[in-house]
Every structure is written in structure tokens, then in C-alpha cells.
Amino acid sequence: MVQDARTIDHSLPADAVPLCELRDGQCATVRAMCNNRECCPFKHCRCEYCKLLRAMGMSERCKLRVCRNRRHCIVQINSTRLGIAGAIARNILVSPVKDNA
Amino acid sequence: MSATPHDAKASATRKAGSPEKAPPSCFALLGNPNTGKTTLFNRLCGIRAKTANFPGSTVEARFGRITLDHGSGRVVDLPGIYALDLDRPESRICRDYLAGDIAMGEPPEAIVVVVDAANLRRNLVFVSQTLQKKLPTVIALNMIDLARRRGARVDVEQLSRALGCPVVPVIARSGAGVRELLAAMKHPAIADAALPAIDADADAWAQRVYDQCVTDDAHRAATGDRLTDRLDGVFTHPILGLVIFAAVMTALFYAIFSLASVPMYLIELLFGKLGSLVSAVLPEGAIHDLIADGVIGGIAGTAVFLPQICLLFFLISLLEDTGYLARAAFVLDRAMRAFGLPGQAFLPLLSAHACAIPAIFSTRLIPDRRDRVAAVFVVPFMSCSARLPVYVLLVGVLFTDPLHQGLAFAGCYMLGAIAAFGTALLVRRTLLRGPSPPMVIELPTYKLPSLRTAMLVMIERGWLFLRKVGTIIVGICIILWWLSAYPTVPEPPAAVELRAEAQAIVDNAPQQAAELNEQAGALAARHALTHSFVGRIGRFAAPVFEPIGLDWQLTVGVLTSFAAREVFVSTLAVMFSGGKDAEDEVVLGRIRNARRDDGSPLLTPGSAASLLVFFVLAMQCLPTLPVTAREAGHWGWALLQLGYMTTVAYIAALAVYVGFNAAGFGGV
């Protein structure tokens, strides 16, 4: 069973939720990108997934918009549109942006 | 279109070294996927390019010649990567190649980094990695038109100053700016800009450079996003997306089958004429047979697939260019993951219904190596068009009414698909064990496809097929031809008698004489095949196939079908009808009513069913093996594929034969 990132790292902001819980059209700020203990807003995780996501345009503190959230997610970060499997979206923690919620 | 900033160029010249130093002539083309890197490469090199794998890997690069202001040059189109430091084969190859650790011709003297102007912020992170390699660099700012339409204005001179190397705006699709790029490639520069010290700072650095150099029109960007949202809403919809996918794939395969039929016919006609010409010029004998039947027959058998392969790659290139293919992979990913395959595997598995060879080539769309090898391994299970003549023959033995025949056909396709997905699951849990990386895929901007790029991809892939695989395939065909044509034996007495009879009446009854000669030919062909090496091997191997209901004649058919599956029907046609058109209903009827040496029917329901299952599952296409070996990266995979599929087919056929007999359906 995939662990929910919230259960791992207690240093994350209280409003952080998994990306897969956001609604279509909702905007958010990325707080953590994997369930690695090293991955938090204050540490730069070097796991392969974080490196890939970072290279594809997602990084800690970046803003994203959820274009579509079903079992897989489509998110837009600046001009980049990414299709992300649900298994990864569960581990990406984001803080929803209030005025767009 | 603005050109390279003069000041940047001048400073670049200074930084590149002394004025006496010759400008670079060997360039590496680097960039993120979907930045138009290949389109730019095609613009620079045209068809003067060749594809080759890096030594010891399946990662391929394209090599081309270009004409620079200062002479001829060489460009290496490296695979599209998101970062140089990722633990992926493509990233490793790029790292090693830039560091000069891979011997692949001359090492690069300079880099051309292709960046997507419409997605500049992210691309700048990659640029920072390449600039840190401290090689002379030129930035090709591609898709500048798309960026403008999205409301982004890039200050090229400012960007050039910020990066410390020449930046040239280009539109690779139309060729605009390519001349300026070629001029700038004379003066690449080693960046002296303040680059991020560690990767963690790269985002902030990229954002800073972006803010300095780009003015965004948020309204226009939002309009573009809304359109993309609407299209994505349709193409990635769980139900509508699948319906559209099915429609697109149906259209794709309809186009492949219908458009390829004419050139395929022309190729067959051409080689038929060539065979006739050789027959007319060369005297009867071993050399004549080798060239007419072995070489020309072998090449014809290979080249006939060329139109399908070219069309498949042309249409795939168009689809990929529009941005749709990434969406299709995204929609299908969840369903395919249940069997250990990624969403991108749908295209190889579907196109395998035409032919396994181009399908295996198209597994290159799959990014993960384990996923790719698994797809290569299972693709031949899907029922290809070469199996159809065999299905027609055997289903006709089993059922007479069209409904049951149709269901049996569908069953064959389903059995192949079940075996493919089951095997994928098996190999991903055993030989290719390891985490299946969940999908993260970039969904590129929707755009009109480039016909020029699609044409170049088609030419390149078609040539690669003929050059790399054709030689091996032709070799295999020649060997199989030789085994089935030698040793030659004199015509049997019955055939000699028929010919004498025909000679006697040829003046009075020419039509009857021709029929007698035809009968004599049929007897002679059957006699020759029976006494050939293949015939002897068939008799020798018959005990192996006896448990699944085959006699030596069917065994010969099975053995010759390893050249290509449809050869099974033509072999039986030679044995029972003197080699007439194997798709003729009369000939099929003769095969269905043929007898074994003991007088019992050749094909009983039990033997027909077991043979049908055997053909659905067996790896009877030796030309596929070198392609598997090439794409999987090792001959071991090809031999394992042959052994595994043949074993599975044999066991399944045995179970069917035993089941039919136990149920009392095995006999006539």
C-alpha cells in the first residue's frame, strides 16, 4: 500500500493535502514531491522521481493548476502540462491557493 | 525575425578562444523532449542523416552533415532528455558523450541547445545544466512564433547576455532563423554567466533569467490554456477518450492496410517480373534457382512489408507531432499497468495486428527499458496479417457456418491478446522484475503536424528496415529456400508418364495436354519437397508433433512456416495442389480433403483446432528474431522469445488436441 505523504513528514504546513485531492481548476503551491523523509519544503530531495519532476518543471514552492483530476491528474505549471499517475499524485503534497479554491 | 545579438557574438568569439582557432565543426544537438529538436535537425541536415545506436546500448542518435559558413560540419542529434543527471539510459549517454567518454566518431566541439520559447522557464533549468559542461554553446530558441501567440515576448539580446552565449530565435517548422543559426554556430561561446552552484538553485536562477528576459501577456496565455483544457477534456475523458482513441486507431490501420495495398502489389509485381527476367536470362540450374527463388524471393518477401512500415511511421510521426499520442498513452496507462505495461505500449500491440516487425520498432516510444523489453517480448503474440491465411484454412475445417467461423476468428485474436498480456505480467514479475515507474508524461502543446518531418522519419525508418534487418531476413529466407529446394531429385515416374502423355496429344488437344502437364508439375513439386532437406527434417521431426495431431506432411508445413507464417498454406498447396494460388478456394478445399499416408484425413477437427492454437501462439516468424534482438539489446531475448512462444504454443495445442479427443470431437 502506498503511504500517504502526510503520515510521514510532520514538518509540512498544516494545510498540505495530496495533489489527488484537489478539484479541477484548483490552484496550489507544491510543498513536497514524494514520500521520502528527506523531501520537505526545507530540504532538496534527490530521489529519482523528484529529480524527474523537477526537470519536468515541478519543484517545491512552484504554483500549479489542476486541469483535470480523475484517477490520473493533469496539471499545468507555467507553460508545462504534465500527466501524472495517481500513484505519484498521492505523494505530492500541495497547499491549495485560497482565492482560487 | 531578429538575429544573434552582435555584442553577444563578439563576446562569444573572444571567449571561444583566440581568433586563429578554427571554428568548431562537430556539434551535439541537445534539448528537452517536445522542443522541436528533431525538426530542427531535419532542417539542418535534410536526408543527409543516418541513425545508429550508441555502443553497448539501445539508445540511438542521429548523425548528419551540415554545410556551415566555414565548411562542412557534423551534427549529432542526441535523444531528448529532461535532465543530464537523471539515472536513465538516455541521460547517461548524453552525459558520457559530452564528456567524451563514449567513442562515437569525433567528440563534440560545441553544443546547440534547442529550447522551447513557449516553455522557456523550464527549459532554462536544462540550459543551466548544459552550460555547466563548459563546452562552447549556442542556444536555438525554437517555436518563437508559438511563444508570441501565447503572449510571451522574449528579449533575445538580454537572454544572450544573461546566458553568456549566442541565442538565435528559430522556427524549425518553417525554417525561419536556420540560416542565422548556422552563422552563429561559427561562434559558440563557453558561458561565463553566473550559473547556479547546485541544482537546488537552478529553479530560482531560471526564474530570475526568465523575469529579466520575458514579458508575458497573461490574458493571451490564459486563452490558449482554456482551448487546451477543452481539448484535453475530450481526449483524456475516461470514456470519450477511449472512443476517440478507438476511432483514431481504426482510421490509422485502415489507412495502413488500404494505402499500402497498392505499393505492396506493385512491389510483388516488380519482383515477379525480376524473377521472370532472371529465369529468361540465366540457364536452369543451381545459380538460377538461388537468384530467382532464394535471393529475389527472399528480398520480395521482405520488401513487401516496406509500404506498411513506412506508412506506420509516417502516421505515428504526424500523430506524435499533433500532441495527441501523449494523451492517448495517458488515457490507456491505467488499463495497461494492470499487466505490467505502460500506456505507451498500446501502439506496438495494436500495430502488431499488421506485422510484428514494425510493431517492435515502434516500442521505442516506451521510455522505461524494462517496459520496452516486455513489450518487445510479447508483441508477436498479437495476431498479425500473416496468420490470416492459416486461420482461413483451419477455421474452414472446424466450422462451416459463417457465425461460428467469425466467432472462431475473434477467438484467435482474443487468445493472442490474452497470451500477450499474461506473458507481459509474467516477465515483469520474473525476468524483468522491478518497480514499474508510474507515468509522468509531458502533454505537449497541440499543434499542426509537420509533413516534412513525417516524410523524413518515414524515409529514415524505411531505409533502416531495409538496411539493417533486410540483410538478415534475406539470409534466413535463402537458407530456408535452400533447405526446401535441395537436394534436387528426378521427377517421379508418374509425372514423367503424364508429361509423355501430354507431349503425345499436344497437337490435337492442347488444353488437355496443358492440364496433364500441370498435374505432372504438381506431382513433381510434391515429390521434390518430400525429398528435400525440409521434407526429410519433417519426417524426422514428425514424432515431436504427433502428440498434437500432426503427421509428417503437416510437420513440413509447420517447419517451412518459420520463414513466414503464411508459408504454411503455400507449402500445403505445393504438396496437395502443385503450388497453385494458395488462397484459391479450390486449393483450400483440396488441402482440407487431403489424406495422410495411412488414408485417414489430414486435418481432423482435433488436429485443425490444435494446429490453429499452435499458430496463434507460436513464434513462427524467424525474420522477427533479429528485430527483437536489436530492439531488446541482446540475442538472448530473441532466442528466449522463440523458445517460450513455441513451448507455450505446443503445450496449448496438446491440451486442445487431448481435450477434443476426450470430448469425442477429435475425429472426422
Image (cartoon, grey):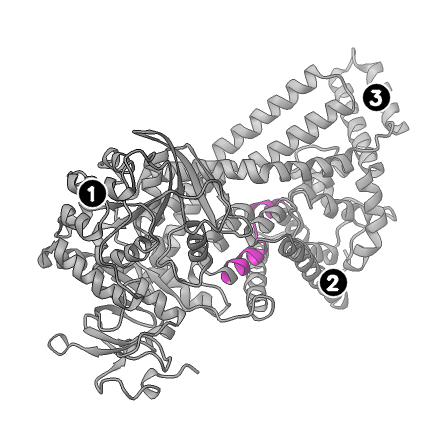
Q: Is residue B385 magenta?
A: yes
Residue B439 in view here: yes
Residue indicated by mark 3: B499
Please report whichever mark, 3 or 1, sits nearer to the chain's N-terminal start.
1
Which chain hosts label 1? B
**How far separated are the C-alphas under marks 2 and 3?**
43 Å
Left or right: where does residue B164 sit relative to residue B575?
Answer: left
Residues under numbered marks 3 and 1 in contact, where contact means CB atoms less than 8 Å apart: no
Q: Which tag is nearer the camera, tag 3 or tag 1?
A: 1
Residue indicated by mark 2: B654
Which chain hosts label 3? B
Q: Is residue A82 magenta?
A: no
Q: Which tag is nearer the camera, tag 2 or tag 1?
A: 1
Most foreground residue, B220 or B586 = B220
Residue B403 in view here: no
Left or right: where does residue B240 sit relative to residue B542?
Answer: left
Residue indicated by mark 1: B11
How far across and how far down the image is residue B288, in percent? Answer: 73, 22
Q: Secondary structure at mark 1?
A: helix
**How far separated are the C-alphas under marks 3 and 1?**
90 Å
Residues under numbered marks 2 and 3 in contact, where contact means CB atoms less than 8 Å apart: no
Q: Which span of residues is magenta-colored? A: B371-389
Q: Main secondary structure of the magenta part?
A: helix
Q: Which residue is rendered at x = 46% and y = 61% of the image?
A: B368
Left or right: where does residue B275 sit relative to residue B351?
Answer: right
Badge 2 amino acid: Leu
Badge 1 amino acid: Ser
